[in-house]
Image (cartoon, helix red, strand yellow):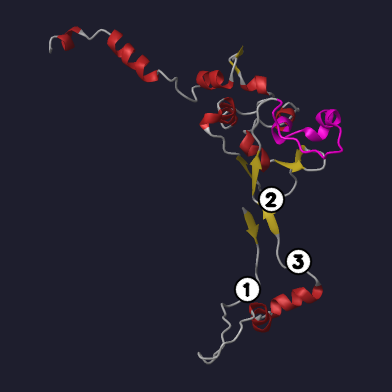
């Protein structure tokens, strides 16, 4: 999604021509556009002075969601794989989000809120404090439930504030769960598969009051 500021359109206009219907004529759309294009005085002045005619800002930033050590890495055929893996440039937005959350004074934010306070430095692959007023909305990439642990990881990132690592996401009340699914269950973010059966069993185990039994 892009926010584009365009001020030079002016009033709506059309370009048309009248020709004989029996006359076969090749239509040159490029020539028609060039001959029919109209430039407003405002746009002409800005063109003469060399000012920018429009600005484009990235309003939505997709945020990568990946399991530990399963991030996507780009490399050239001539690059050394060991050096690429050890290089700081392999840092992803998610791992740097964890790293930034450990720093002193960093607010406890959700992963999707991070882009509203910090900007992604593409040269160092790190998060830097945002000093301008341009608000970028963070959007976690879609993950289908069929992907298993990656889906539950995304669910935790949508609800847990200020996690410092993958292990921190799996830690609930000082207990480290084996999987992200177990952590989501302990946080109450999803129900167990046999939740309906447990509910019915609990209802059957509860004794009815004596006054209610007399009605049956």
Q: Secondary structure at mark 3?
A: loop
Residue indicated by mark 1: 9
- Residue at x-position 67% and y-position 41%: 115
Q: Identify the residue at the far left of this view.
A: 215
Give percent across and percent down for residue 75. 80, 38
Cα–Cα span, label 3 and label 2: 18 Å
In-front residue for pair 37/103? 37
Residue indicated by mark 3: 52
In the rendered image of this protein, does residue 104 appear above or below residue 42?
above
Report the span colored magenta. 69-96
Q: Which is in the foreground here, disc 3 or disc 2? A: 3
Q: N-terminal of the two: label 3 or label 1?
A: 1
Question: In the drawing, what numbered circle is on residue 134?
Answer: 2
Question: With 159 as the anchor, is 8 left or right in this view?
Answer: right
Residue 211 in which image quadrant: top left
Indicate whether residue 53 is drawn in magenta.
Answer: no
Cα–Cα span, label 2 and label 1: 25 Å
Q: Secondary structure at mark 1?
A: loop
Assess whether mark 1 and mark 2 are in contact (beta carbons under 8 angstroms): no
Indicate whether residue 74 is drawn in magenta.
Answer: yes
Q: Secondary structure at mark 2?
A: loop
Give percent across and percent down for residue 197. 35, 16
In-front residue for pair 87/47? 87
Binning the other alpha carbons within 10 Å of mark 2 as few (below 14), some (14 to 19) or many (20 upward) gives: few
């Amino acid at each position: 999604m892009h926010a584009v500021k365009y001020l030079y359109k002016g009033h709506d206009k059309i370009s048309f021509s009248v020709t004989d219907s029996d006359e076969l004529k090749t239509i040159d759309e490029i020539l028609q556009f060039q001959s029919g294009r109209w430039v407003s005085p405002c746009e002409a002045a800005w063109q003469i002075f060399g000012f920018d005619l429009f600005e484009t800002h990235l309003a939505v930033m997709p945020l990568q969601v990946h399991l530990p050590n399963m991030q996507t890495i780009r490399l050239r055929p001539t690059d050394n794989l060991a050096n690429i893996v050890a290089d700081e440039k392999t840092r992803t937005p998610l791992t740097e989000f964890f790293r930034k959350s450990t720093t002193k004074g960093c607010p406890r934010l959700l992963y999707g809120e991070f882009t509203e306070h910090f900007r992604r430095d593409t040269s160092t692959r790190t998060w830097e404090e945002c000093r301008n007023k341009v608000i970028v909305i963070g959007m976690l990439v879609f993950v289908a439930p069929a992907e298993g642990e990656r889906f539950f990881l995304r669910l935790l990132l949508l609800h847990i504030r200020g996690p410092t690592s993958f292990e921190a996401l799996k830690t609930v009340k000082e207990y480290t769960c084996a999987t992200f699914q177990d952590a989501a269950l302990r946080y109450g973010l999803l129900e167990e598969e046999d939740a309906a059966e447990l509910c019915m069993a609990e209802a059957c185990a509860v004794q009815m009051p004596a006054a209610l039994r007399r009605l049956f």
